[in-house]
Amino acid sequence: MPPTAIPLLRAIPNPTYASVMTLGEPPAPPAAFRRALETLRPAEVRPEIELEDIPAPQRLAPYSGAVGASVYRDDDELAVGRLIMLFDPDGQRGWEGPFRLVAYVRADMEPEITTDPLLGPVAWSWLTEALDAHGATYAAVGGTVTRAVSEGFGDKADDPVTTELELRASWSPLDEDLTAHVAAWCDLMCLAAGIPPLPPDVAALHPRPVRREDPKVP
């Protein structure tokens, strides 16, 4: 009986991993992004607004930053929002430049207001007119206006019906200085909360300190 042939086994390199791995500090963000980030958190805002730094999404662009805000009248929170700055040195489809701002605003509304068919166009004009009023240069603006009605059932049947307005928008700022864009976003939140914008000759005050007893929204 002839001897059984034993196949030779060869080690096949794993293409998934590099043969050499290096560790080191990540590269510093581009200077344009750092300059824009400094203007995302203004030193002065309206007295009704509280600003805070919030985590920015990591998968929408190579670099990002974000701020959150609440609008108060006395101790009542009337509106909340967030403004996200995205930066991609190569740009992305639909952008006109390396920057993109993404804004969100939510405010409580009276039921009779949310049934007005003109609410959507009017709420959208709050954003565009605020941008123009502050001299913000931008392109490729788009977004949605949503009206939400919440009713309780079962154990929550006695809860009052609530109505909310949500505005989501994005646009491309054409300048690294985002001061005018942040000011317009703050005006948008105040208008959604029913607070008129400040006259041009009235200066904003320093931000109100964050109150320790305020619950944090997850």
Image (spheres, rainbow, N blue to C red):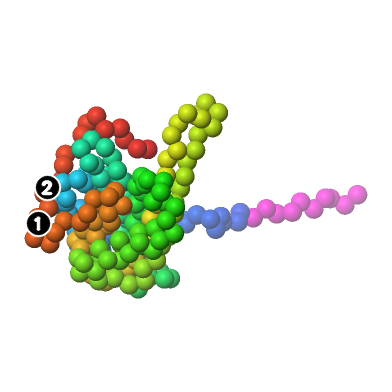
Q: Amino acid at mark 1?
A: Val
Specify few, some or many for label 2: CA neighbours under 10 Å numbering under 14, 14-19, or 20 or more: some
Label 2 and label 1: CA atoms lie apart by 13 Å
Return the residue found at the far top.
Answer: 155
Q: Position of residue 16 (x, y in %)?
A: 53, 55
Position of the C terminus, as image quadrant, is top left
Label ID, residue 202: 1
> Could you tell whether 106 is left or right of 187 in the image?
right
66 left or right of 6 in image: left
Query: Is 115 or 145 nearer to us in this picture?
Result: 115
Say which residue label 2 marks: 206
Main secondary structure type of the part rendered in magenta: loop
Residue 89, placed above or below residue 207: below
* Residue 33 visible in the shown view: yes
Element at badge 1? loop
Residue 114: x %, y % from top left: 42, 51
Check if residue 138 falls in the magenta segment. no
The residue located at (24%, 56%) in the rendering is 187
Residue 66 rendering spot, x and y as whole percentages? 29, 52
Q: Select label 2 or label 1 by which is in front.
A: 1
Where are the magenta residues, as a range?
1-10
Q: Looking at the rendering, which quadrant does residue 32 occupy?
A: bottom left
The reply to whether residue 120 is in sight is: no
Q: Amino acid at mark 2?
A: His
Element type where label 2 sits in the image: loop
Q: What residue is rendered at 37% in x and 47% in y?
A: 109
Which sits in the foreground, 1 or 124? 124
Mark 1 nearby-residue class (10 Å; few <14, some 14–19, many ≥20): few
Residue 63 or residue 65, whichever sits in front: 65
Residue sitting at 16 percent across and 39 percent down? 209
Front-lying residue, 178 or 165 = 165
